Image (cartoon, helix red, strand yellow):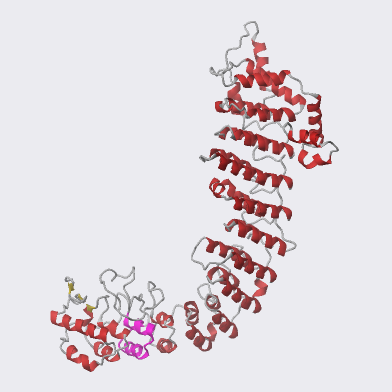
């Protein structure tokens, strides 16, 4: 191939496939013709003949391009200059079907130049050739001519449709919405010697491209295609994506409105809401038309993912909220659409094994908690028998869907005060309408588990501001209180251990002394709402920690027993006294854990004493002193350090001091109420100070 030759004025000349080069004289004349056409597109052929006749017949004039990379034939077809096209077509080297892009027949079809289309077809232009359309603007990014030419486009209207898709002439005729051109091509396709047949029925193609005049023509001439399924869709599925006049026209010609896409099983309601990308007003008007013409029976029909039209509205708003290119729906518009569907029979909880309720859909997709609250409130109030405990296809109830994001610590720190208020109100609405607090996800993840894990993770987050960490804890605590007030069972294990044991495990994640107060508040709350402090711990979890503390070989903590006069059996008896009697209780476990955290023991405020005193005030008498005895025996064989001295002395004092009659009465009341003080304290006929004393274990 020869080198490209650039001339002034932006004309670019290149060699053709036959290696026939243009002379400088010919290139100059064609450049002049481009300039003349640019100045006067309707100039007569007679005025151009003086230049055209000087061009040698053996030279391929199509090798010359203007400043945007289009040759004289493409230019003349685009301008509908029939005489110039007639002059060019008989020339040698004129192959109408071999262009990098913008075939002459495609240009003529797109612009609706009927005479030019017929002329090109007579000279061998093929119906089945596919190419992209760049004309008349710059070449598209995936065209092989891109970057070769630079220049400003002429003042010619540019097609608004995407120019990156390969299409044949039928597609471009429908793109331009030219009925007469489409008829010419259709007649040509019906000739017996033409092998080309369209891949897609013309009505489908016209509905897909939104070619109104073509659709009007085809519903009468090709009525057999109105209810024909092709490539997943019926024509009406494409019609609802455009102005409602397309839908009304097809319905007028007896298009079936209850059809579904073959794979996704989407009804027309799904397509309008999820795929059409219309604004809220147009969406509402289209839904009204569909419901009036047979779609009301599909108002609760799910697609293959279990998404109902009501769920689809919520998902559509979430997509718009996430800025996926959808038209903006305001809060009031989405509420209006949801209300409209509910009034027409939509239900937020339908009996289907593969789907999710609308409530779960709201919590899973909506980010704005104010909108979330308004939607939940509407869904629960508009449907009298709404089921807030419907289990979705992932095995979770709406309450679990709402709580699970708390496991991820990032959203917790991004919550503003108003978001937290609406979040709590959403949970409150669910609980008021009968949501089950003791639900679970795949049998081992419960609301209690989520909240305890969230508090523990909150300790480990690198937040410099203690106020923020405290605000996060208060938020989770308020959720826990709300769940406890509506029947959350604290006696159920947080897999694989009891809730109080899980709270004590938080000590291992504590980073600041103030975090111990959070553990105290959680422990108090659980004990007030039925937590049993007297339970025996799961041996598997704390066993290694306790055994480490009880090891007689730890040189830094335990000295040799000074029992020279004791025999081996005596030593073994001492060891068993604190290994077996009291070690499997919460108090012992907590002491062992804080002994591993020196900064907790050296805290000037001694926050850990509040937890010890709480357990001291709530444990059953025999269990308490068995546990204290085990600790006492442990400390006998341990060398006190500066950090542990105060703790050891304090445990010794508790062990040697019996509880008062008042404290014993409080424990008796606590046990008689089955450890559920908060729920039953007001039923007791006692003075308020006494009630506070019993309830708060002060």
Magenta span: 103-126
Write down the quadrant of residue 180 in the picture.
bottom left
Q: Main secondary structure of the magenta part?
A: helix
User: Camera-side residue: 525 or 86?
Assistant: 525
Does residue 114 show up magenta in the picture? yes
**Whole-percent x and y of residue 518?**
63, 37
Q: Is residue 14 left or right of residue 512?
A: left
Can residue 228 be seen here? yes
Say if 433 sits above or below 473 in the image.
below
Numbered marks: total: 0
**Whole-percent x and y of residue 604?**
59, 26
Quadrant (top left/top right/bottom left/bottom right) for the N terminus: bottom left
Q: Residue at x 63, y 69 (%)?
A: 337
Q: Residue at x 73, y 54 (%)?
A: 432
Write down the quadrant of residue 398 in the picture.
bottom right
Can residue 261 be seen here? no
Quadrant (top left/top right/bottom left/bottom right) for the C terminus: top right
Does residue 274 show up magenta in the picture? no
């Amino acid at each position: 191939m020869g080198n490209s030759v650039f001339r002034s004025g932006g004309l670019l000349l290149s060699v053709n496939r036959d290696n026939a080069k243009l002379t400088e004289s010919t290139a100059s004349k064609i450049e002049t013709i481009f300039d003349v056409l640019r100045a006067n597109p309707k100039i007569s052929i007679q005025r151009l003949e003086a230049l055209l006749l000087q061009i040698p017949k053996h030279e391929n004039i199509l090798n010359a391009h203007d400043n945007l990379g289009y040759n004289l034939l493409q230019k003349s077809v685009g301008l509908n200059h029939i005489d110039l096209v007639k002059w060019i077509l008989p020339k040698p080297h004129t192959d109408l079907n071999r262009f990098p892009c913008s075939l002459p027949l495609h240009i003529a079809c797109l612009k609706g130049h009927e005479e030019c289309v017929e002329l090109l077809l007579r000279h061998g232009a093929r119906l089945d050739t596919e190419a992209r359309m760049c004309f008349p603007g710059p070449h598209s990014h995936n065209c092989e001519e891109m970057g070769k030419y630079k220049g400003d486009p002429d003042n010619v209207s540019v097609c608004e449709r995407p120019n990156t898709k390969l299409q044949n002439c039928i597609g471009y005729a429908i793109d331009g919405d030219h009925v007469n051109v489409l008829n010419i091509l259709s007649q040509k396709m019906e000739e017996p010697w033409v092998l080309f047949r369209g891949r897609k029925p013309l009505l489908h193609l016209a509905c897909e491209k939104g070619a109104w005049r073509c659709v009007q023509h085809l519903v009468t001439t090709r009525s057999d295609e109105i209810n024909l399924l092709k490539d997943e869709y019926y024509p009406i599925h494409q019609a609802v994506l455009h102005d409602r006049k397309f839908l009304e026209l097809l319905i007028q010609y007896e298009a079936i409105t209850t059809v579904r896409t073959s794979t996704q099983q989407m009804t027309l309601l799904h397509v309008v809401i999820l795929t059409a990308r219309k604004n809220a007003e147009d969406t509402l008007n289209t839904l009204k038309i569909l419901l009036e013409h047979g779609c009301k029976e599909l108002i609760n029909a799910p697609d293959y993912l279990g998404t109902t039209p009501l769920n689809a509205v919520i998902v559509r708003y979430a997509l718009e909220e996430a800025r996926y290119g959808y038209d903006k729906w305001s809060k009031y518009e989405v509420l209006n659409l949801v209300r409209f569907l509910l009034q027409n029979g939509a239900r937020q909880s339908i009996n289907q094994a593969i789907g999710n309720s609308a409530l779960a859909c709201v919590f899973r997709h909506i980010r704005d908690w104010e909108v979330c609250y308004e939607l939940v409130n509407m869904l629960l109030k508009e449907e009298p028998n709404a089921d807030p405990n419907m289990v979705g296809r992932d095995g979770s109830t709406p309450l679990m869907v709402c709580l699970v994001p708390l496991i991820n610590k990032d959203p917790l720190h991004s919550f503003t005060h108003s978001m937290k208020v609406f979040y709590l109100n959403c949970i409150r609405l669910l609980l008021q309408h009968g949501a089950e607090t003791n639900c679970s996800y795949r049998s081992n993840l419960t609301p209690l588990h989520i909240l305890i894990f969230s508090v523990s993770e909150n300790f480990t987050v690198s937040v410099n501001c203690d106020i923020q960490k405290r605000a996060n804890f208060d938020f989770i605590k308020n959720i826990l209180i709300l769940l406890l007030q509506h029947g959350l069972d604290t006696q159920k294990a947080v897999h694989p251990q009891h809730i109080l044991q899980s709270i004590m495990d938080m000590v291992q994640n504590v980073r600041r002394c103030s975090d111990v107060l959070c553990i105290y508040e959680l422990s108090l709350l659980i004990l007030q709402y039925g937590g049993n402090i007297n339970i025996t711990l799961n041996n598997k979890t704390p066993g290694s920690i306790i055994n480490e503390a009880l090891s007689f070989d730890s040189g830094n903590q335990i000295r040799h027993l000074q029992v020279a006069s004791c025999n081996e059996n005596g030593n073994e008896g001492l060891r068993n006294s604190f290994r077996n009697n009291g070690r499997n209780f919460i108090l012992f476990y907590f002491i062992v854990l804080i002994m591993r955290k020196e900064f907790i023991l050296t805290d000037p405020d001694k926050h850990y004493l509040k937890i010890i005193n709480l357990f001291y005030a709530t444990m059953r008498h025999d269990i308490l002193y068995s546990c204290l005895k085990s600790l006492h025996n442990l400390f006998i064989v341990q060398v006190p350090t500066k950090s542990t001295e105060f703790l050891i002395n304090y445990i010794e004092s508790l062990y040697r001091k019996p509880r008062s009659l008042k404290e014993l009465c409080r424990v008796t009341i606590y046990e008689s109420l089955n450890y559920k003080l908060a729920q039953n304290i007001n039923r007791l006929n006692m003075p308020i100070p006494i009630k506070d004393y019993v309830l708060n274990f002060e």
